[in-house]
Amino acid sequence: MRTPRFIALACTAALAAALTACSGATQPPPGTAGGAGFEVTPTSPAAKGPLSSFTWSLYAEPYTLDYALAYDFPPNTVLANVCEQLLRVTPDLKIEPGLAVKWAQPDPRTLVYTLRPGVTFHDGTVMTADDVVASLKRQMDPATGSPWGSAFKAVDSIEKSGPLEVTIRLGKADALFHELLAASPGTVVSAASLAKEGKDYGTPKGGLNCTGPYALEKWAQGDSITLKKHGKYWDAKLAPKSDSVKFTFVEDSAARANAFLSGTADGGYMVPSSSFAQLRTSGKGRLYFGPNTGAYNLAVTDFKGTLGDLRVRKALSMALDRKNIVKAAAGGVGVPAKAPAARGAWSLVPEKTASLFDTLPEPAHDVAAAKKLIEEAGATGRKVTLATSTLAPEISVVANAVQAAGRQIGLDVKLQPVSPDAYSNLFVDPAARDGLDLVITSGYDNTPDPLEFYQYLRTGDFGNYGNWSDAEYDLAFDRANTEYDPVKRTELTAKVQEIALAELPIIPVYEAPHSVFLGKRITGAPTGIAQLYYPWAATIGAAQS
């Protein structure tokens, strides 16, 4: 579960999404094709020819291009095309070989990865096991300060066991660790470049030396980042169709929409919902909606206060008018969330999605029953403090809706304004959450495994913002995470989900698909959250032959 920067930074992050309709996550959940008239499709039409270059809009400048520190959409959107992982989450939400051509598990606590031969870094040197060991160990080093360090919590050792072989030993079975090697934790970079760049690595002053289809050409701080085609890229099926990509940074939502309309930017992901209507009717390109693994939630940050009573949490959930929240916050493009982890996160075993997620009841909206619960809890008139911010329109919309719902049932919901930078800090500094009862988050997965989201509600986990603790939940999670068979693990995850819904340490609000705008001259982009790890820019080319 991680919160993107436009809502805030939080705990652990995102996944990939879609080119072919092979997974339950690539199809809209029941009821999504209506209302605002949107359709979730896995990709835009294939490119018809090459391009010399195209320009891509980011909503903010990356704060780093260091793979170990990249923990947000802007840096990961760039790095997805430059650096690669041992494994790859494919567009149809499956995990396949990446820089590791195969792997074996001789016992539940040992993982052996055979590396792909002949892979070259951007400087022409050949990737070896030493590079893999250095890259992964760096994330474990406290001196690095990697937010991904928790992924390695069960790792005892990472060792070179052959010229093209790496063996990882775990202190206990951890099914999620292997899967996360398809995300940032599995990133491989040149060990020599790490030593050479030192503290400048991943900054505008330093270089990057990875294996992806594009190489970093220039980072003009405050202006743009330019990537150039890597002519010796190992994966022929993802050979770049464009020679270069230029990323520009536009923080203002209206200015970003104008960049799309004017052609200053050829495209961009995570389009502001406030501009959906204008872009869809502009004739300047096309707005696509793609698979997503995230949902917008309310995370309880204080279980010693008003929301420590389960009846109050249930009442607040029942008071929320989620359908109107979707209209106001997401331009009508979305659905009420049934659970903290979204439907799209249930993609590891897509044939189980219907029985384990779709059968969940729609969230109830019953103000009278909610008010009765508040009275039974003796909570009438009690205060609930919710953080709000100008960081993104969605935050203000959801915050105002929660305040209105709370007042309807007798709660005194106070909105605490927080500056954009300070709002991001709420998710990394526990002291910053002092005095708050709720924060608005957008949690999503790195992998197609829904269990990944639920790990952040375990007792003591960094992402457990309110320090919620439930022994039954912890036991259910541990059972699931020691089960390596994906079908069995998915079934065990349903029990974890059941407890989370019964106890509501997180109150689900709504799901929305991913969005991307493509101007008239380009096409070929995956439409979903694939942008975070899949080399999406390689598939973009000319819309006309």
Image (cartoon, rainbow, N blue to C red):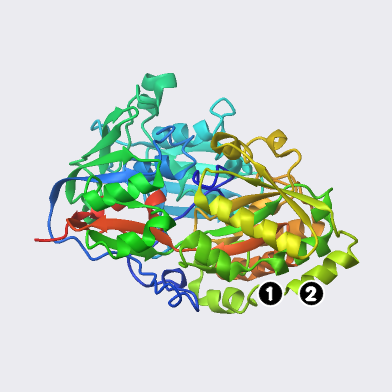
Dot 2 corresponds to which residue? 369
Determine whether, in the image, residue 371 is placed left or right of residue 229: right
Give the image quarter of residue 370. bottom right
For the C terminus, the image quarter is bottom left
Q: Residue at x 29, y 34 (%)?
A: 224
119 or 253: nearer the viewer: 253
Give the mark nearest the N terminus, 2 or 1: 1
Q: Where is residue 92 in the image (x, y as percent from the top left)?
A: 39, 65
Whether residue 472 is visible, yes or no, is yes
Mark 2 element type: helix
Q: Residues within 10 Å of mark 2 (few under 14, many from 20)?
A: some
Judge left or right: residue 368 versus residue 200. right
Apparent side of residue 332 relative to residue 149 in the rendered image (left or right): left
Q: Residue at x 46, y 69 (%)?
A: 25
Location of residue 155 by image quarter? top right
Return the residue at label 1: 364
Camera-nearest residue between 125 and 436: 436
Relative to residue 304, is residue 163 depicted above or below? above
In the shown orientation, is residue 444 left or right of residue 213? right
Q: Which residue is drawn at 57% across and 58% down?
A: 296
- Residue 364 at x, y percent in the picture: 68, 74
Mark 2 or 1, closer to the camera:
2
Image height check: is 374 above or below 391? below
Q: What residue type is labelled 1?
A: Ala
Res 165 visible:
no
Name the kind of residue labelled 2 in the image. Answer: Ala
